[in-house]
Image (tube, rainbow, N blue to C red):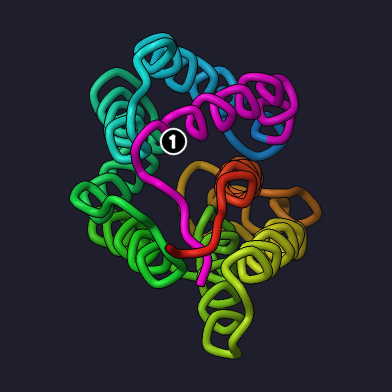
Amino acid sequence: MQQFQNVSSGDIVLSLAEQIIENRAYLSEIDGKIGDGDHGVNMAKGFGMAAERIKGNDMSLAVALDTLGTVLMTEIGGSMGPLYGVMFTQFAETIEKVPAIDAATFSAMLHSGLDGIQAIGSAKVGDKTLLDTLVPAITAFDAASRDGKSFSDSLKALVVAAEAGRDSTRDLVAKIGRASRLGERSLGVLDAGATSCALILKSLALGIEARLSPAA
């Protein structure tokens, strides 16, 4: 059974922040087609602020995730700050007291984050939101784990499903938020939240995969 250590894994969150910052212009460009056009800017601001607080502090993954979630919830405007903020703080809470994180714990972490998002928002799969990335990704991870796949292979399944979910939003009509006012005109464009969620999940998966080792 594969697992990774919670302690000193906070750098995973730094890599995640770098991905969002690098893709700032791309995320805002997508958002500008059917939304406010500030998704990348707001996300990069929040993730950058959190990264400054994490750097050089040798944090556990739980503490780094909580730091990121708190910054997003308290200091970033728009709809995505609270949604991602609650997701990351729920992630942190789930693994807070777990020294070694295995596939079952990681799944529980993902589900807790999803529950947090669904508790504060009304979106569902098919509404052209980040849930169109997150839900299929969790489902794919759980299915791979149930089929006896390793933690590493289950993470690969998660990434494939996350990116397919992101791409599916191109063919969806927005039902939530500013983009929903465009109706059919929101077709043909990726959802910015679904796109940033795919970046987050891929970065998280790669960071974890690099740290996996057999359970002692």
* Residue 168, image x, y percentages: 73, 65
Residue 9 vertical placement versus 202 (above, below) = above
* Residue 211, image x, y percentages: 56, 45
- Residue bearing mark 1: 9
Q: Which residues are magenta?
A: 1-30
Q: Nearer the viewer, residue 181 or 132?
A: 132
Identified at 61% across, 22% down, the residue is 18
Identified at 66% across, 26% down, the residue is 28
Examine the rendering and report whether any part of residue 122 can be seen. no
Among all residues in the image, which is located at the extreme front? 216
* Residue 73, image x, y percentages: 27, 30
Residue 187 vertical placement versus 23 (above, below) = below
Identified at 69% across, 56% down, the residue is 166
Give the quadrant of residue 66: top left
In the image, is residue 14 part of the stretch drawn in magenta? yes
Among all residues in the image, which is located at the extreme right? 188
User: Three-letter amino acid code at disc 1?
Assistant: Ser
| 159 displayed left or right of 62 | right
